[in-house]
Each structure stands twice: as C-alpha cells, then as structure tokens.
Image (cartoon, helix red, strand yellow):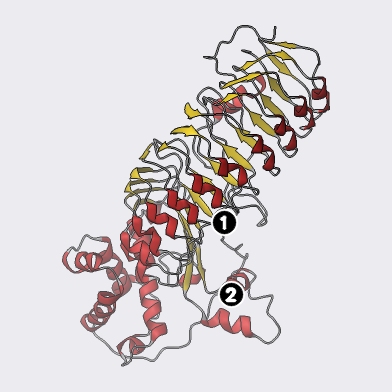
Amino acid sequence: LMAAILLVGAGVGVALGLTLGGSNGKGGGGVSQSTADENEALSGEDVVPPPQQDETVEGTPSPSPVVTASVPAPELTRPPTTRAPVAETSTTTTKAPVADISLTAEEKEQIALSILETAIPSSSYAALTSDPESVPNQALDWVLNRDAYPYDWAGLSSDPIDETAKTDLLQRYVLGGLFLGTGGDGWNGGRGWMTSDDVCTWWGIECGSEDVIQARANNGQGDDGDGEVWRKLQSDRTVTKIVLVDNALSGFLPEDLSALPSLTAIEMHENRLRGTIPSSIFELAELDTLFLDANRLEGEISPDIAKLTKLRRLTLNDNRFVGTIPTEIGQTTTLVMLWLFNNGELEGGIPTEFGNLVNLESLAIFNTKVTGRIPSEIGFLQSLKIFKVENNLLSGALPNTLYDLASLEVLGIAGNRNITGSLSPRLGRLTKLRELYISETSIGGSLPEQIGELTELSYLSVTGTELSGPLPATIGNLSNVQFLELGNNNFNGTLPSEMGGMTGLISVLLYGN
C-alpha cells in the first residue's frame, strides 16, 4: 500500500514497483512536508518584485507552492515596470524664457478657471468652484499662490492660447491634485513633487515618447547624431506615464487625470487607494497600461473599459470589486493581460465575448465567486499563455476547444469542485504546457496516455479528483517534472517502471490511492 509521501531528490528518479491502492482519505490537505512552509507563507496577494529583464513574458507565473486542499493559486508576476532608470544627476528640462506680463491675482485665477472649465470633468470643476476644502480647490490654490514655477501667463492670456503654456498649467494642476488627494506627504518616494522643477523630473513621472524617456533617464546621452532626440528632450514635456508603485498612496483616484490626454500608463498598484475608478479614466484614449491591483478599490467594474481601445494591460486584482465581469471587456481586443483575481465578491460567468480577445496572453480570474462553464470561445485565444481560474464556482466539463490553445504554458482550474467530465486525449496537443493544476475538481476517468506528450511540464498537480485506473507508462516521458502530486484519487496498480525516466523529480505525492 502507498499511503505516504514519497520524496525524491532532484535527478535521482522514483523507486519502482510500488503498489497503488487502499484507503482513500480524500479530506486530506496533501501538503508535502518540504513545501508546507511555502504554503503557509502564501498570502494570496500578488505583491511580487518585478523581474529584472524586460524580456519576461507578460503575466508569467513564478514557481508555485504545492497546491493544498484550499488550493491557493500559484503566484503571478507582472512585466517589469515601465519606469526608466533615473540618472544620478538627472537632466533638467530647459524651459524657454517667458514674456514678462503683469496680471493681478484675480486675473490669473480667471484665466486658470477658464482653462480648467473645459479641461476637467464637470463634477470636479463644480467642486473646485464651490468647495474650498476640495482637492481641486487646493490644487488650484497651490498653482496660483504657492507654486514658484514660471508659468507663461502671457501665453495663457493670448488669443489663441499658447498650447505649451496651457499644457504646463494643466499638468501641474492635475499632478498637484494627485499629490494632495492621495496623502503625498506620506508617500514612500516623492522627489521633486510640489517643487518648481519641471514635472518631467518628478519621481514616477515620465514625459514624451519612449526615446525621449530613455534619453532623459540617460542624462541626455544616446542621441542619434543629429540632435533630434536632444531637441525632443528639451521640447517634449507632455506627461505620458505615472508610475507610483507601492508608494503608500491613499485616498481616491482623482477625476482630473483625464486632463492628461497623452497618458499611456497609470501604474499605481500596491497602494491604499479606495473608492471607485473615476469614469473619466476611461476617456484616456491613449492608455496602454492600467495597473490598479492590490488597492482597496470597490464597486462594479465599469463597462466603459471598452472605450480604452489601445489598452493592452489591465490589472484590477486584489481589490474589492463586486458584481459581474462586464461583457464589454471583450471589445478591448488589444488586451494582452487581464487580471481580475482575488476579488472575492465578483460573480456571474466568464463572458463568451472574451473569445474576441485574440491578442490575450495572460488571463487570471481566481479566488472569486464566478460561476458557470468555461466558455468554448476560449479556444479562439491562440496567443494565450496563462489561463488561471482556480478557486471559483465553475462547473461542467472542460470545453474541447481548450485543448486547441497551442501557446498555453500554465493551465489552472483547481478548486472548482463542480468541474466534471474527463481529460481528453487532446490534452497532448498542449505541448508548451509547463504547469497543470486540476486538483480538487470532479474530473474523472483515467489519466490519458497523451500526458506523456507534455514534455515541458515542470509541475503536475492532480490531487483530490475522481481520476482512477493505472498510471500510464507514458508518464515516464516527463523528465522535466519536478513536482508530481497524485494524492487522494482512485489510482491503482503498480507504478510504471518507465517513471524511472522522470529524472527531474523533487517531490512526489501518492497518498490516498
């Protein structure tokens, strides 16, 4: 009988000829002693330092702890932050001298108000003009009375208005409001903020196109020889990225971010932001990246996400969102990364419209109350590398189209007890699969012999299912598997001698068969 955990050192292989069968205590947790500490430390939050190299696959999971009876989903890591490295002595963007013009404080205020009236959301403008304690009012007070930056009031009062002067005023007003409204004095990093320095030198703010951002980070070096990048460095002061990760931001996201129409990235994950996502955020037509995970955001996920037609990366996980996943997300066909996990009150089904997300590489919706079947339309996502839907309330058999995802590297459906049916022989098509988690489901039948075609597998977790019968001899082809978890099933017979070829094994769980 085999009612214990067999631990095998890396490169040693499995002892052969052991018999499977006997008591089946399916209530067990199935935790290897060698990895129990890892599981205990897993918090369920994705607070993981980004990888060091930019070549990392978007949404690639880090090595996973052993899946227990509670099936904690393996951790995910995001791509590296888009923030460019900051030079020791950063180049200060030079602003051209502005014409001297004498205006009263009241005249400056009227000019600023006339600009803001058409640039910021109406609700924000109403607060600005009616509530002296509001963040918009405090931001304007800073601009007019405490900011030493040399605003171009001549350009602001000209007809037509000078667009560079207008951009300067709007950017400083909006970012000043962001600082004041999210507890800026308590941020972890805030070099340059609320000083007279150009906003492009403020911590976490990036301006211009990618070549300009890199040139600024390199202290102006790396020009193409004709001075073009340097000229852009001096002239392109349009804010395009706000990167304030794990920076102790608190309070609410300001509506006025919509007054920065060139924004391509908002990265404010791992903070303490609360409330709902302002609807004005969805007016940022150039937005490519929206990282708001690991905050305290709440409410329903807005269908207006569909307005962000250039959005590629969206992370809303580890918040307090409720309601259903909007079907309109399926219209954002540019998405390559969609993380909604660890929103415990998120419910409803996985929209069939997700089948339109043909560029999607990473889809993670676990630890929620999402119900229903995995839609067959998932099979249209031929770029999908990561599909993780553990610990939900999903049901029914796996769609056959799931086995058509030739790019799939991680498949996690564990912890959905009402997922039924059997594993299709078509499983062998998923030849790029590195991690497979189907524990704590009601999948039955036998382990198909085509499992041996998944030669890239490093982690195979199949505990607490209805699988039965002998193990296929082809399992011995899986020489890269390090963690093999087969406990609490109905397997019987002897271990195939071919398992001696599994030379990468570190841990094997066979109890409860």
Q: In the structure shown, which secondary structural element does the residue marked by tag 1 occupy?
A: loop
Disc 2 marks a residue whose amino acid type is: Val
Name the residue at 53% across, 22% down: 69
Image-quadrant location for residue 213 = bottom right
In the depicted structure, whether residue 369 falls above or below residue 31: below
Choose between 152 and 473: the one closer to the eye. 473
Name the residue at 44% across, 49% down: 352
Q: Position of residue 14 (x, y in %)?
A: 79, 20
Q: Position of residue 106 (x, y in %)?
A: 21, 81
Q: Tag on residue 81? A: 1
Q: Tag on residue 314? A: none
Image-quadrant location for residue 7 = top right
Classify mark 1: residues with Cα within 10 Å, few (<14), some (14-19) or many (20+).
Answer: some
In the shown orientation, is residue 306 left or right of residue 246? left
Q: In the structure shown, which secondary structural element does the residue marked by tag 2 occupy?
A: helix
Q: Position of residue 80 (x, y in %)?
A: 60, 54
Q: Position of residue 59 (x, y in %)?
A: 58, 49
Name the residue at 59% across, 50% down: 384
Q: First in sequence, mark 1 or 2: give its number.
A: 1
Which residue corresponds to mark 2? 212
Quadrant where the image shows the C terminus: top right
In the shown orientation, is residue 158 left or right of residue 446? left
In the depicted structure, whether residue 103 falls above or below residue 302: below
The answer for how far apart the CA atoms under marks 1 and 2 are is 17 Å
In the depicted structure, whether residue 63 falls above or below residue 145: above
In the shown orientation, is residue 291 left or right of residue 181? right
